[in-house]
Structures are given as structure tokens and as C-alpha cells.
Image: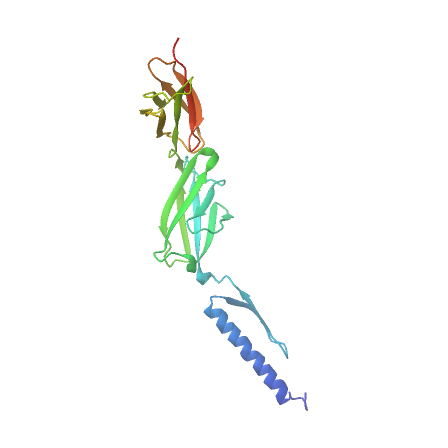
Amino acid sequence: MIDGKQSPKSLRIIVGVIIVLFVLIGFALIKGMIPTKIVFPVVGGSVELNERHKDNFTILRITVLGSDSVPVEDAHVWLSIGGEAKKVTGGWEFEIPLSKLPVNHKLDVYAEQQNAHLKGHREIIANDSRMLAITIPLIRDISAFIKGTVSDDSNRPVVGATINIVGSAGSVTTDAQGFFSLPANAAEGEEVRLRVSKSGYEGLDQYHPAGNVAAYIILRKKR
């Protein structure tokens, strides 16, 4: 200080710092950040930036309804583009960067209660709204198949054996290799009761999980 006044050198430093800070702020705003605190000491300065400016994000709020149409709290929720779901009161939220949206802004939203064999899905278009709210009703998952082979007690394929699922309509017959495949009317991993029969063989009921694990069934010839 000279006679209560700042020296030209000090003034140049302060002006330089202010210019740098304003450049940083301008760059931050262009990038969608927001300054939250600016400090101007005599010879220095700093800017704190919030890197999650909401103008660059769409907030998606999801409510999942159980089979009784009541909101559930224990579902698994996910998006086709990934991202982490945040649990909030009455549902879930995703904070989706606009830069991650597809060109057509279409998203698939999924929900499930695995233990209850319930699933739900919705396709949405994330428009320019900063907050989207959707509801996904869960329905019973019956998409799995069940497959396997039928052999006799000598390990030879049984051709033309009839297989059906107890409690469901429809049946299939085994091919030349004893193979069969039919809709399980159940979810992946859910136990179903298979009924297998063929003339000249003892009938058989056998439980097996629906899905990719093949069932191996042995029919015994009648004595």
C-alpha cells in the first residue's frame, strides 16, 4: 500500500485474478455447471462449482404398483440406458444426463419383484421436461419355457410321449430324440408340475423349474 492506495502492481494482480475467475465462471456456465461460492481475497480467488446443474438433467420419478395396484417399496427398477436408481418416498428416481439420451429420446423402464414373479415395463419419451413421473404396474411373469428329454430306463429316447403342465392348457409330444419344449406359463425359476405319459409306460408327474435348466425324465415300461 502507498499513502492508503494500492500500488499499480497490486491492482494488476487483483484485476488479473478477477478476469481469471470470470473466465472460469463463463466456462462453467457453458458446461452446465453452476457457481455456488465465489471468494475474492486480496491476492487470490476461488470458485466452487456444482457439477450437477439440473438444466442438463431430466429427473425421472417412478412409482411401481403391485398386483393389488398398491405402490410397492421392494421392487428392482432399472433403465435401458443404465444409471443408478435413487430410492425416494413412494418410489424411485433417476437423474438422467441429457447427453446420455438416445437421439429419439426413447427409454425403456423396467421393474420387477423377483420373489413374487412379477414384472413390468414401460417405454417412454424423455422430452424437454425437467421432471417426468410414470407408474409401472407389475403383472405375473409367465414368459418362461420348459424343455427337456424323455428316456426309458435303458436310456433310450421315448418318441411320442405326451407332456403337459398340470393346471395349464395345451401339451406337446417328444420328437425322435425324446426332446420337448413348451410354454411353462410361469416365471424363470418357478417350479411347475410336469405330467408325462405314453401308452405302454407308467405315467409320471415330476416337478421342475421353468427356464433354461433342462428336465431329464425317465419313463418305465409297464410290466
Direction from residue 207 to residue 197 in the image, left or right: left
Residue 168 at what x, y percent from top left? 35, 25
Q: Nearer the viewer, residue 101 or 179?
A: 179
Compared to residue 90, the image places residue 202 above or below, namely: above
Asked if residue 137 can be seen in this view, the reply is no
Direction from residue 83 to residue 5 in the image, left or right: right
Q: Residue at x 47, y 47 (%)?
A: 92
Direction from residue 215 to residue 16 in the image, left or right: right
Q: Nearer the viewer, residue 205 or 98?
A: 205
Q: Residue at x 57, y 83 (%)?
A: 15
Residue 103 at what x, y percent from top left? 35, 58
Q: Quadrant of the N terminus?
A: bottom right
Query: Coloured how?
Result: rainbow
Q: Quadrant of the C terminus?
A: top left
Q: Quadrant of residue 210?
A: top left
Q: Residue at x 39, y 25 (%)?
A: 149
Q: Quadrant of residue 209?
A: top left
Q: Nearer the viewer, residue 187 or 203?
A: 203
**Total of numbered circles in the picture?**
0
Residue closest to the far top:
223
Compared to residue 81, the image places residue 174 above or below, namely: above
Compared to residue 209, the image places residue 24 above or below, namely: below
Residue 100 at what x, y percent from top left? 42, 57
Compared to residue 112, the image places residue 94 above or below, namely: below
Asked if residue 94 can be seen in this view, the reply is yes
